[in-house]
Image (tube, rainbow, N blue to C red):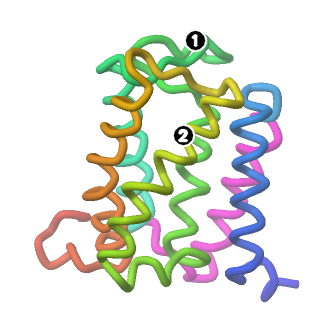
Amino acid sequence: MLRVLLSKTFNIIAFNLTWLACVVGRDDYLWLAAPAVFVYVILLARHQVIELKRLLPLIAIGISIDVLLTALGIFQFEAGLFGAGRLLIPAWLMVLWVAFSTTLFLSLRMIGRYKILAALCGALVIPFNYAIGERLGAVSFSGAYPLALLSMSAIWIVALPLFYMIADGKLERFNVTT
């Protein structure tokens, strides 16, 4: 059973279920998603599948990017459980960042082996996910829709390869993650 929980297959299934709970259910399913994700992270760390010193910066950067996009007015969220307003992102999105960060060590690790593929995925896949979230009512884009997608693409074409470098410990020699 433990082997299954630590597998790439379980990781991608768990992330997708978390994505559904967080994006579709938002605050209504936060009570279920948050504890499940945090127990999963503890399990992965305890069995040395991930290192918290590499995971925590990924979570912090991801949340910071979304906070920045919110502060710039590109993202808008409904006031939720914790009153996410103009400068805060909802708690469910923070939980989603924790879950997504685990995929960089497991199920999506192969993307990081190729920096061009990571950049392309950053430019296309991450904005696509936000566009789906927008269609499901989880986020609103203010201003021109194409400009919001272009802004995300410009950020994530650089950020996703950087995420993989952090996950792989390639930036430790520069003392970036310590």
Kindly identify the residue that appears in the image at 74 percent across and 79 percent down: 9
Q: With 58 as the anchor, is 50 left or right in this view? A: right
Q: Using the rendered image of the protein, determine whether residue 27 is visible from the camera's viewpoint.
A: yes
Kindly identify the residue that appears in the image at 38 percent across and 15 percent down: 143
Q: With 103 as the anchor, is 156 left or right in this view? A: left
Mark 2, secondary structure of its residue = helix
Image location of residue 74, percent across then percent down: 38, 23
The front one of 115 and 6 is 115
Image quadrant where one finds the N terminus = bottom right
Query: Is residue 45 within the magenta segment?
Result: yes
Mark 1, secondary structure of its residue = loop
Sequence-wise, the earlier of marks 1 and 2 is 1
The stretch of residues the image draws in magenta is: 30-53
Could you say which disc has been placed on residue 106 in the image? Answer: none
Image location of residue 164, percent across then percent down: 36, 71
Tally the numbered discs: 2
Q: Quadrant of residue 134?
A: top right
Could you say which disc has been placed on residue 83 in the image? Answer: 1
Kindly identify the residue that appears in the image at 34 percent across and 52 percent down: 156
At label 2, which amino acid type do we have?
Answer: Tyr
Outermost left residue: 174
State the residue position of label 2: 130
